[in-house]
Image: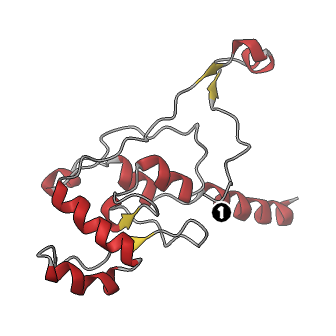
């Protein structure tokens, strides 16, 4: 994350303004929504080959040679010092920049500029017909307006209102 969160404080929860002013009463919260998916060996090998090549299109030939080719349209290998692609709702479209795995909900939320104190509720992911009735965490993050962008837009609007 290029050190963007290096100086951030642990998230904390308070119930009243008195608790907010009394620093001793802060309850330090754990980091939520940061559970990695369980992936089988075949998926780990596939993601490892793509990660090593740095690009899915470049890796397709090697994947086919070793019997791990797929008809999946896209994988995005993240770069630690580069710009993130647009965050979508499907976690396995992205490969962590240093580990052959999909991103966690928290990692995707950070790319969207959500503070670590924001907790996403519900199931992490859902498939098939359940998506019609459930909104999983990955979908909540992928469909969200990035908070920093919303703030910037709001500040510009406020300039003209005041």
Most distant residue in the right direction: 162
Q: How many marks?
A: 1
Q: Quadrant of the C terminus?
A: bottom right
Figure check: 159 above or below 22: below
Q: Residue furthest toward the left?
A: 67
SS class of the residue under badge 1?
A: helix
Q: Quadrant of residue 65?
A: bottom left
**Residue 33 falls left or right of residue 149:** left
Residue density around tag 1, few if under 14, some if 14–19, many if 20 or more, within 10 Å: few
Give the left or right position of residue 98, taking residue 89 as reference: right
Question: Which residue is at a point 65% across and 20% down the rendered structure image?
Answer: 14
Residue at x 23%, y 64% (from the top left corner): 45
Q: Which residue is mark 1?
A: 149
Check the picture and name the quadrant holding the N terminus.
bottom right
Residue 40 located left or right of residue 35 = left
Residue 126, relative to residue 100: is it above or below? Answer: above
- 96 in relation to 116, above or below: below
Q: Residue at x 24, y 46 (%)?
A: 38
Q: Describe residue 10's horizontal placement relative to residue 90 as left or right.
A: right
Identify whether 69 is placed above or below 57.
above
On the image, which quarter does residue 161 sit in?
A: bottom right
User: In percent of the image, x 39 and y 80: which residue is there?
Assistant: 55
Residue 87 position in % (x across, y down): 46, 65
Q: Which residue is nearer to you in this view: 138 or 106?
A: 106
Q: Nearer the viewer, residue 80 or 108?
A: 80
Q: Position of residue 85 (x, y in %)?
A: 49, 73
Residue 20, percent from left and from top: 75, 21
Q: Looking at this view, is 155 or 54 the one in front?
A: 54
Say which of 88 and 69 sits in front. Answer: 69
């Amino acid at each position: 994350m290029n050190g963007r969160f290096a100086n951030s404080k642990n998230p904390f929860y308070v119930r009243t303004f008195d608790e907010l002013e009394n620093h001793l009463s802060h309850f330090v919260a754990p980091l939520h929504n940061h559970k990695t998916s369980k992936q089988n060996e075949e998926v780990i090998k596939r993601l490892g080959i793509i990660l090593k090549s740095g690009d899915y299109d470049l890796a397709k030939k090697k994947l086919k040679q070793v019997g791990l080719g797929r008809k999946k349209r896209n994988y995005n290998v993240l770069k630690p010092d580069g710009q993130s692609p647009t965050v979508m709702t499907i976690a396995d479209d992205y490969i962590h920049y240093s580990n052959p795995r999909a991103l966690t909900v928290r990692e995707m939320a950070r790319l969207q500029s959500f503070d670590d104190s924001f907790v996403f509720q519900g199931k992490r992911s859902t498939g098939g017909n359940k998506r019609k009735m459930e909104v999983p965490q990955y979908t909540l993050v992928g469909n969200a307006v990035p908070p920093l962008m919303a703030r910037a837009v709001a500040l510009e609007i406020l300039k003209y209102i005041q």
